[in-house]
Amino acid sequence: MVTVQSLVLTAADRRLPVTLLDKDGVSLIVDDAVATVTLTNPAKRNAQSPALWRALAEAGSLLPGSVRVVVLRAEGVSFSAGLDRQAFTPEGFDGEPSFPEMARGSDAELDGIIAAYQDAFTWWRRNDIVSIAAVQGHAIGAGFQLALACDLRVCTEDVQFAMRETSLGLVPDLTGTHPLVGLVGYARALEICATGRSVHAEEAERTGLANLVVPAAELDGAVQDLAAALLAAPRDAVVETKALLRGAADRTYDEQRAAERAAQARRIRDLAGVAE
């Protein structure tokens, strides 16, 4: 029986990448310790839909344990123009609940639908991987939130981030509000969301939305260089460090000191080959 694990092992032996997913505007290719998730509908500027979100969630579930870095990229001139406008028609998407149908459901039903959509955006911050969004052109609404779902963002000089949900009478509900506030602060996050304005490359880099801004022709190379730098450090040290940093905002100073001590003790024992 052929399994995902056996395919990956075969590819590792041959030093060849393996495609584990290619459907609904999403592909997943694993090349040893690096996985690449690509949005593959450039004709629609990688507009998003529930089917795409399910494919993204599936991509996360298919990652083999060998993967340490996940790159999220998109084909075409835009990273993602946000939610497909078909969502705003009375019919919505074929086979999916429309907005009117969602509105008529119970609180629990509506909450469950939105929670399922959010699954596409949550796994990118797992402690066992570091995720990098390679962002070009427009990253609007759900596209902005997908870029924010990743740990790091490398952007092109023509990038335009915008959170347009509030302008449409909605709110950003695809997990983007927490990382946005963490990166730029409450006041700037409120202003960006409430006005729906565009954030261009210079501001994105200055405020921390972008870790790096490069010319479009250098985007892939810059992401590859960053992935290589991340892979240079021992995996367990990166995992422990990421967990420390992710939890820092929710801990007091003394709690963070204690967490650092516990993490360092684990690393010292591991390096010395002493079991806990």
Image: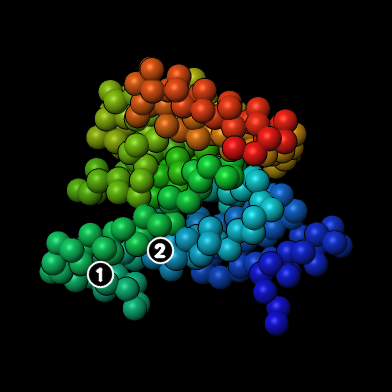
Would residue 39 be seen by someone viewing this image from the given angle? Answer: yes
Q: Where, quadrant-wise, is the N terminus in this rendering?
A: bottom right
Label ID, residue 98: 1
Could you tell me residue 199's position as x and y percent?
42, 31
* Quadrant assignment, res 62: bottom right
Mark closest to the chain's N terminus, 2 or 1: 2
Circle 2 residues within 10 Å: few <14, some 14–19, many ≥20: many
Q: From the viewer's perspective, tell me whether residue 220 is left or right of residue 205.
A: right
Camera-side residue: 174 or 157? 174
Residue at image location 64% in from the left, 59% down from the top:
64
Q: Where, quadrant-wise, is the C terminus in this rendering?
A: top right
Toward the front, the furthest residue is 275
Camera-side residue: 261 or 14? 261
Residue at image location 86% in from the left, 62% down from the top:
14
Residue type at numbered disc 2 = Ser
Relative vertical location of residue 131 with respect to residue 188 in this rendering, above or below: below
Label 1 residue SS: loop
The residue that label 2 is drawn on is: 49
Toward the bottom, the furthest residue is 1
Q: From the viewer's perspective, tell me whether residue 226 is left or right of residue 205.
A: right
For marks 2 and 1, give the CA distance. 12 Å
Could you tell me residue 58's position as x and y percent?
51, 64
Q: From the viewer's perspective, tell me whether residue 272 is left or right of residue 134.
A: right
Residue type at numbered disc 1 = Ser
Could you tell me residue 260's position as x and y percent?
51, 24
Residue at image location 59% in from the left, 41% down from the top:
130
Circle 1 residues within 10 Å: few <14, some 14–19, many ≥20: some
Label 2 residue SS: loop
